[in-house]
Amino acid sequence: MVRMWKKVSTAISILCIVVYMFAAVLATYKIVNAVTEHRIIIEQEFAKLQDRVRGAGVLGFTGADLENEIRASVLRSLTLDAVIVTVSGGVAFAVEKPGERAIVPNLSNTGYSFDTKWKIYRPPYLAEVTGDGRTTLEINALVGYIDKERLGDILRETLLIVLLSVTAAFLVLMLDVIVFDKSMYSSAKEHDTRPPKPPREPMTESAEEPHEPVLGKKVEEPTGIYLGLIQKLHEELASADEKNTDMVLLCVEWTKTSLADASLAKQIAEEAAVFFRVDRISAFKRGETGIFIVLPDVVFKHGLKAAREFHGRILDNTAFKTTITNFYVGLTSRAGREIDPERLILEAEKAVDKAKEDADQPIVAFKADPSKYKNYLKNKSSP
């Protein structure tokens, strides 16, 4: 169920990314089209403005009458934001749409100029028009690159698409966290089937790790085992056997302070997921002050090195310094053995118990001899 949900959540995440890209491309396409259409309208309206000025000149409009004609053209225009007209005699006047504030007085020649600072405008359109055959007018028109209302509509549509996609991604993330928590922190009852007790213990200490535990001849029954962990180990052991790879199991235990809360185990498990960066990593609660961490496709040597670094990372993390006083790690691995989950858990628990006995050695690893373990299985199966 969890694997299926992971596939579904991944597919939805990819779909959200595709939607983001589609929204960006669509918005860019619409803006480019809007800019092109806006430019065509600008040229048409600027030509109409010139025609209107010529017509006003033929009718003999000058001064305030001519200014009113141009003002009416600007107010009715879709693209013209401001216009400055300079008459051949040096008289100038300027009009602009309400709220533009694009025209400032030019005190040097008692005229006007455009203020385009911090605003997105095209270079002014310029034309000279002879109105009545004697008077020449210079027309400067300031326009924008795109219609502001059109741009607002495009951005709102794009924002709506992105908002829907983000909402979908957020819901998937929340469901993913819920599903992940169910798998990572199993609260099922302990396993009812007791593992058989082997007649002898073939495990030996590792030459590489002098402080690993030595199991006694009588194997104790494992404790703190949950159904979810057993099922996970069954799956990963079968996968490791099929691919002929190794896997590591960590048993982590700590001493908490009075400042620690019920979410401490979850916080440490999340820190492990970020630190180890192993595919299919999973963690399961072990009482109130411990967790099991399953690391598929990790060899014993690399797992031991990573466990030491993880131990230092936890104790150096300021978030845990006020909630944890001691931190112990017990480690074991498949090591090419046909081992059952219960036995693997027992080895990890024995390792962490050994770590708790020596404050100078908070990390203890249990490493088996594969050949002796095979002989042990043969003797176990023989009558």
Image (cartoon, helix red, strand yellow):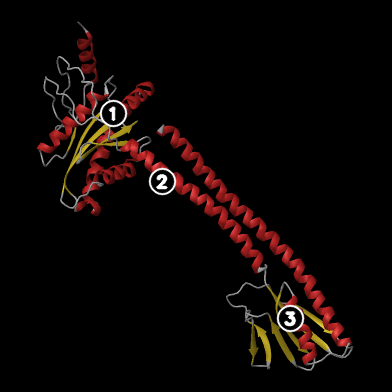
Q: Is residue 168 left or right of residue 220?
A: right
Label 1 secondary element: helix
Q: Contact, CB < 8 Å: mark 2 with mark 1?
A: no
For the N terminus, give its image quadrant. top left
* Residue type pointed to by label 1: Leu
Which of marks 1 and 3 precedes in the sequence? 3
- Considering depth in this image, is 113 or 40 the residue closer to the camera? 40
| Separation (CA) of disc 2 from disc 1 | 25 Å
Q: Position of residue 150 (x, y in %)?
A: 66, 64
Q: Where does residue 317 sit, x and y in percent of width and height?
A: 24, 51
State how far apart marks 3 and 2 are (Cα).
Answer: 58 Å
User: Where's residue 142, x and y in %?
Assistant: 70, 77
On screen, residue 129 versus residue 321, left or right, reads right
Residue at left 42%, top 33%?
3
Q: Which residue is mark 1?
A: 227
Residues tagged 3 and 1 counted as in contact (Cβ below 8 A): no
Residue at image point 59% right, 78% down: 117
Q: Residue at x 53, y 51 (%)?
A: 164
Quadrant in which residue 351 is drawn:
top left
Pointer 2 residue: 174
Q: Nearer the viewer, mark 3 or mark 1?
A: 1
Q: Dot 3, crowdedness within 10 Å: few (<14), some or many (≥20)? A: many
The spot of residue 271 in percent (x, y) is: 30, 45
